[in-house]
Amino acid sequence: ARCLLEAESFNRQVLQIRLELVARRRFRVLKALLVGLQLFDLRLLLESHAAARAARRASEELLTQMRQCALEQLQESRERGEGHLDRISALNSRFHRLLLAAAHSPRLDRALASLLEAPLIMKTFRRYSVESLERSALHHLELVQAFEAHDPDWAAAVMRSHILAARIAIKPD
């Protein structure tokens, strides 16, 4: 019963955020509405939406850059040479910036800017297992495939999986 109440409360908060966004037609979310929402919950909503937009709007040039970035990240996650986490962090940040560029939404850019800061992501990667590092890069490659197929539902689903996997990867034991 407690889980249901928490889920219901979360859903009300998400609904409040969505209503606020629609009502104001701006991407400003009141701090009061964010009480109880976790970083990954926000990323889940916003980045899934960005991925769906990117699937409809990504140029060939951006797709090529995203694919190259994801392939380099996969190579780094498999080779694991000295400094690989720094390089993976940089490639991950670049991929997500390219994805936001492909989404063509300055509002999403602003909303996600503070959520995708490098120090936070770097701490996340330090807690990843070898398998989690590789899975993250493979998610990026699958996102590129969804974008190439112009399939917003697939892209949003992969992004949700990507964010949920990251959340689990950093959970304390």
Image: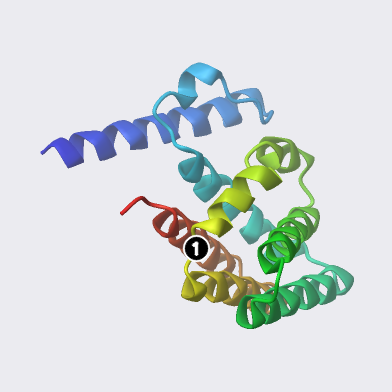
Q: Quadrant of the C terminus?
A: bottom left
Q: Which residue is mark 1?
A: 128
In this view, which residue lies farthest toward the left? Answer: 1
Answer whether residue 67 is visible to the viewer in this image.
yes
At 77% from the left edge and 62% from the top edge, which residue is drawn?
Answer: 57
Query: Would residue 26 be found to the left or right of residue 35 on screen?
Result: right
Q: Position of residue 126 (x, y in %)?
A: 55, 57
At 57% from the left edge and 58% from the top edge, which residue is drawn?
Answer: 125
How many marks are shown on the rendered structure? 1
Query: Would residue 5 be found to the left or right of residue 133 on screen?
Result: left
Answer whether residue 116 is visible to the viewer in this image.
no
What's under tag 1, amino acid-wise? Tyr
Q: Is residue 7 above or below residue 143?
A: above
Q: Position of residue 58 (x, y in %)?
A: 79, 66
Q: Is residue 14 above or below residue 127?
A: above
Q: Is residue 41 above or below residue 142?
A: above
Q: Quadrant of residue 53?
A: bottom right
Q: Position of residue 165 (x, y in %)?
A: 45, 62
Front residue (pair 147, 125): 125
Front residue (pair 13, 92): 92
Q: Position of residue 106 (x, y in %)?
A: 79, 41
Q: Quadrant of residue 93?
A: bottom right
Q: Quadrant of the N terminus?
A: top left
Query: Would residue 109 be found to the left or right of residue 145 on screen?
Result: right
Rate crowding at label 1 as few (under 14), some (14 to 19) or many (20 or more) other CA atoms within 10 Å: some
